[in-house]
Amino acid sequence: MIVYYINSYDIEDEAEFEKYPPKVRPLLEKYGAEVLASDTNALPVEGTARKMNAIIKFPSLEAALQCYNDPEYAAIKEIRHRSVKNCTMVLVKAFEKEL
């Protein structure tokens, strides 16, 4: 079942954060993920938007968790930890379509 990784956070250190996307992209590809949206200027219609909002599609929950827990991601994740605050990350299962 397809899952969507949805994250939002505030970027505090732009220069440090710029190191994150080029390092994480190959790892996402390794697990069959596709970046569907990534926006630093999201339009809030209710509540407060964070500086960065992204939606990434994974082919399965297992693939998403394997990616997140990949030892290679541990070092990459540290870049994000150093450069952002107010981070929320969730995995959301896609609806199953009825035939």
Image (tube, rainbow, N blue to C red):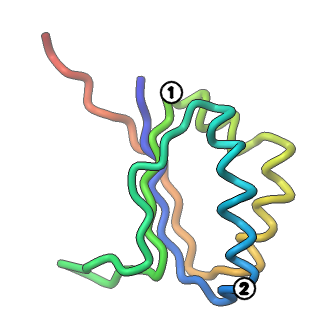
Which residue extends farthest top?
A: 99
Q: Is residue 13 above or below residue 80?
A: below
Residue at the image position 57 percent from the left and 72 percent from the top: 87
Residue at the image position 65 percent from the left and 62 percent from the top: 21
For label 2, the residue is 15
Q: Is residue 57 above or below residue 20?
A: above
Residue at the image position 43 percent from the left and 36 percent from the top: 3
Q: CA distance from mark 1 to mark 2?
A: 32 Å
- Nearer to us: label 1 or label 2: 2
Q: Residues within 10 Å of mark 1 (few under 14, many from 20)?
A: some
Asked if residue 96 lies left or right of residue 1, the reply is left
Q: Earlier in the sequence, mark 1 or mark 2?
A: 2
User: At label 2, which amino acid type do we have?
Assistant: Ala
For label 1, the residue is 60
Asked if residue 47 lies left or right of residue 9, the reply is left
User: At label 1, which amino acid type do we have?
Assistant: Ser
Element class at badge 2: helix
Q: Nearer the viewer, residue 99 or 36?
A: 36
Asked if residue 67 lies left or right of residue 41, the reply is right
From the top left corner, tell me how far across and down residue 16 is, in percent. Answer: 75, 81
Q: Quadrant of the C terminus?
A: top left
| Residue 92 falls in image quadrant | top left
